Image (cartoon, grey):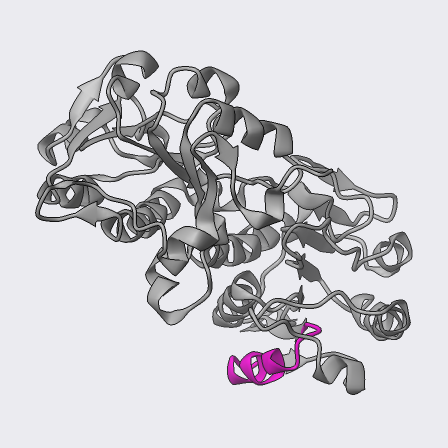
Amino acid sequence: MRIAVLTEADPAEPRVAAVPETVKKFVGLGGEVVVQSGAGKDAGVPDAEYEAAGAKIASSVEETLSGADLVLKVRRPNAEEIGKIGKGATVIAIMDPYGHEDELKAIADAGLDAFAMELMPRITRAQVMDVLSSQANLAGYRAVVDGAAEYGRSLPMMMTAAGTVPAARIFIMGVGVAGLQAIATARRMGAVVTATDVRPATKEQVESLGAKFVAVEDEEFKSAETSGGYAKEMSAEYQKKQAELVKGHIAKQDIVITTALIPGRPAPKLVSEEMVASMKSGSVLIDLAVERGGNVAGAKAGEIVTVGNGVKIVGHTNVPGRLAATASSLYARNLYAFVETMVDKEAKSLAVKWDDELVKATNLTRDGQVVHPNFQPKA
């Protein structure tokens, strides 16, 4: 079983799909691990550490992929990489499949068995494989750190001989994994924290972390959650009522962090231009959904925009990648946990169990076809 770990082709992606800890485990499963030279450089892992863990270092993409049964990546392979992976190989990555049907077809046409880590079902057995949670957790933490850096003032209340410095007010919009970590981090840093979400179960979670919950709690709110634990898209009427409540609240905030995403859809607009205009000069908005269109009006992917009233809108992309070493370590563990379920430990070879619920949920392409029901070609 030959396992290939590539250097990410995208220069904006510093994460890597394996770390020395997981390389040792793959070798223990009987795998021959080949890592492209420099793959871990931006995540703080030199080639020598991979070699010490039992991996071979290859100097090129072609050498890394030669004879590979399993290819591990952070992001979906690009067209050049697809052409160099042997037919019948298994590829596992964060595939970002929504809206990329042509890329999926290219992977299928190349005869690759592709799996999307972000489609892992949210069940107890798969918690250790939940890449969305491991990466969003870091994004929530980093969002508060970035917000504090851009805000330019202290977050906790300080009593000094020169007078009292008031605590910063931080508002978290969207209380998933990223939002909960943002609340916890902002509270640890001494801010006064409020949060909102359309899912009723989040109210108790928010309050348990010492923050105040802000939402229109009507009948629609009480049923606003899917069986998978995601937020439902709310009616226009509810969105209008919630916007009115938020509008008055947001004007008093120093830092606003938005995290709202609905799988397979553009990010919902939560903060209007009018709301941005109501904020004080020097306030900061961190939009963690900017890569999906953004929650904040005026947010631009990869940019920090300062609007006319002196408010900053921060649109950093790949926020987990801003903590590349930690993000890579967690992602690599997610990958290993999933791959382990696919390995025949006696034969020490890849043996995908096609009827496994984890496989069914994440498998995008097989035998030259796009097989996942969510991404079938449209008639």
Task: Please say if 48 is above or below 116.
Answer: above
203 is within the stretch colored magenta:
yes
**Residue drawn at the location 57% of the way across and 84% of the way down:** 207
- Residue 260 falls left or right of residue 106: right
Give the position of the N terminus as an image quadrant: top left
Image coordinates of residue 154 in percent, x first then y, are 58, 61
Image coordinates of residue 163 in percent, x first then y, are 63, 72
Image coordinates of residue 209 in percent, x first then y, are 51, 79
The answer to which of 351 and 44 lies nearer the viewer is 351
Count all numbered tags in the image, as a single digit.
Answer: 0
**Residue drawn at the location 65% of the way across and 72% of the way down:** 166
Residue 303 picture quarter? top right
Q: Does residue 37 appear in the picture of this structure?
A: no
Task: Please say if 217 is above or below 66.
Answer: below
- Residue 363 falls left or right of residue 54: right
The answer to which of 326 and 338 lies nearer the viewer is 338
Residue 200 picture quarter? bottom right
Q: Does residue 155 appear in the picture of this structure?
A: yes
**Residue drawn at the location 23% of the way across and 28% of the way down:** 46
Residue 376 picture quarter? top right
Give the position of the C terminus as an image quadrant: top right
Task: Please say if 261 is above or below 74.
Answer: below
Magenta region, residue range: 196-211
Image coordinates of residue 11 in percent, x first then y, are 49, 24
- Residue 335 falls left or right of residue 98: left
Task: Please say if 272 is above or below 346.
Answer: below
The answer to which of 151 and 71 lies nearer the viewer is 71
**Residue drawn at the location 34% of the way across and 20% of the way down:** 86
63 is within the stretch colored magenta:
no
